Amino acid sequence: MSDIQKAAQIIQEGGLVAFPTETVYGLGADALNPYAVAQVFEVKNRPTFDPLIVHVADLRQAEILVQKFPSAALKLVEKFWPGPLTVVLPKSPMVPDIVTSSMPTVAIRVPNHPLALELIRESGRPIAAPSANLFGQVSPTTAEHVRKSFGKKIEMILDGGPCQVGVESTVLSFIDKEPVLLRPGGAPLEEIQALIGPVRVAQKAPGQILAPGQLESHYAPRTPLILAGPQEALPQGQRLGWLGLGKPADPGPFAAVESLSEHQDLREAAANLFAAVRRLDERNLDVIWALPVPDQGLGRAINDRLTKASHRK
């Protein structure tokens, strides 16, 4: 029996499998089995008010899980699927409430990774999967990151190498008359708007959750991370790590430096983001000093993750 067949059998029997996607590693369960999905929340320590994304193999499988597929959403998935775009649509009654946090909508995407697609097809199940890490911590982009989070708490980890995109999917809602961006991610907003026209950016009330990954504090390392403003002064007398594009103008104050991309390439920066934060988090630092990147294309997703990683109550 191959690894994929073993993993598919675990999913069919209600177990958990960590698997690679192009964005981050996911912790997957049969999306139609509420008991299996409950294990995801339990193992991750994830609050049940935070909904999950359902991963499917193709548009045909997605259509079974929703009530309707608006033309604008179809136009986007034809371009971006498989890929880092999640669409939020009215759900079919067959989708358990625990997957959607009792909301009448479901978030769906087709991942762009051969192992993920093989797992979905071999199991014959849509797979509900948040990132394969403890809730609120830095997202995993390698199988080793998953092992460090869970050890033997899950039945199997499929190793597909490092994730190529490195930040979670863009989440777009088609519930209102106009499409709404709920979370920036691996599909750039500019490319989406070029295809379907203007997209409204969600303005949610504090504490309101409309889609996965919308909590104000998320993706956080153990080491305090400061997203530096233009006039913000460096902390004094502390062991500092630096995170940003290129290199620091003066590396002297920093005990560790992580360049997301020495060539200022936002795609490379996104792919390196979570692994770089993890490396800094392991250096026994007092503070990670992070610089925002240009807020365009994938930079919008990078800045979103850094903002949430730096949030302190």
Image (cartoon, rainbow, N blue to C red):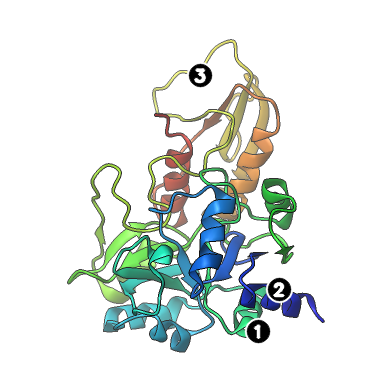
Q: Which residue is mark 1?
A: 122
Q: Position of residue 195 (x, y in %)?
A: 32, 76
Of all residues shown, which one is farthest toward the left?
A: 177
Q: Which mark is residue 234?
A: 3
- Tell me the tag on residue 52: none
**Number of other residues with Cα within 10 Å of mark 2, as a class: few under 14, some 14 to 19, many 20 or more:** many
Q: Identify which amino acid the numbered label 2 is placed on.
A: Ala
Q: Give how far across and how far down residue 239 sits, in percent.
A: 64, 19
Lower position in the chain sequence, tag 1 or tag 2: 2
Quadrant location of the N terminus?
bottom right
Please tell me whether mark 3 sits on a helix, a strand or a loop: loop
Residue 269 showing in the rendered view: no
Select label 1 or label 3 by which is in front: 1
Q: Quadrant of residue 4?
A: bottom right
Q: Residue at x 59, y 10 (%)?
A: 237
| Coordinates of residue 200 in the picture (x, y in percent) | 23, 60
Q: Which residue is mark 2?
A: 7
Q: Give left or right: position of 206 versus 213.
A: left
Extreme residue toward the right, this view: 1
How far separated are the C-alphas under marks 1 and 3?
A: 52 Å
Question: Measuring 44% from the left and 49% from the top, which residue is drawn there?
Answer: 47
- In whole angstroms, how far apart are the C-alphas of marks 1 and 2? 9 Å
Cα–Cα gap, marks 2 and 3: 48 Å
